[in-house]
Amino acid sequence: MHNVTLIKGDGIGPSIMDVAVKIIDATGVNINWEEADAGMAAYEKHGAALPDETLASIDKNRVAFKGPLTTPVGKGFRSI
């Protein structure tokens, strides 16, 4: 079993990632998808575009599969 952090993203990201996950799952590879937040949705929910929980999941799993993200506009934000 492979554990992978899944970041669906913003905008069309969740739709794209749902299809991508179905395609990967159809290969028969045994993956446990661990969903995590990042981007604008994470910023609105957690106050950070890349929350500590997401970083911890990536650190633990050692791999992430990320969809398109919206980066908040303004000083102090970096593209992720």
Image (cartoon, rainbow, N blue to C red):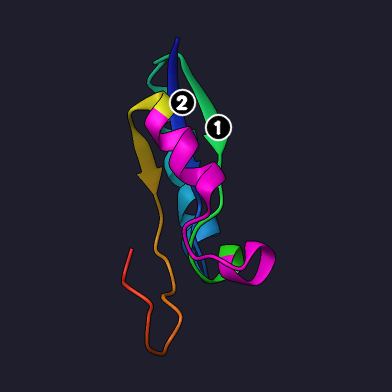
Using the image as rendered, state which of residue 64 and residue 28 is in the foreground: 64
Farthest residue, direction bottom: 74
Judging by the rendered image, the residue that carries numbered circle 1 is 34
Q: Is 62 situated left or right of 20 in this image? A: left
Helix, strand or loop for disc 2: helix
Label at residue 25: 2
Q: Main secondary structure of the magenta part?
A: helix
Earlier residue among tags 1 and 2: 2
Task: Assess disc 2: are there few (<14), some (14-19) or many (≥20) residues with their C-alpha within 10 Å of its C-alpha.
Answer: few
Give the magenta range: 43-59
Using the image as rendered, state which of residue 72 and residue 14 is in the foreground: 72
Q: Quadrant of the N terminus?
A: top left
Q: Is 75 situated left or right of 43 in this image? A: left
Q: Locate residue 46, reporting x and y percent.
A: 64, 62
Rendered image quadrant of residue 48: bottom right
Task: Assess disc 1: are there few (<14), some (14-19) or many (≥20) residues with their C-alpha within 10 Å of its C-alpha.
Answer: some
Name the residue: 43% across, 26% down.
Answer: 60
Q: Relative to 72, is 5 above or below?
A: above
Residue 68 shown in magenta: no
Q: Locate residue 19, reporting x and y percent.
A: 48, 46
Q: Relative to 27, is 80 above or below?
A: below
Q: Locate residue 12, reporting x and y percent.
A: 50, 67
Label 1 and label 2: CA atoms lie apart by 14 Å
Q: Locate residue 47, reporting x and y percent.
A: 61, 68
Name the residue: 32% across, 73% down.
Answer: 78
Name the residue: 56% across, 53% down.
Answer: 37
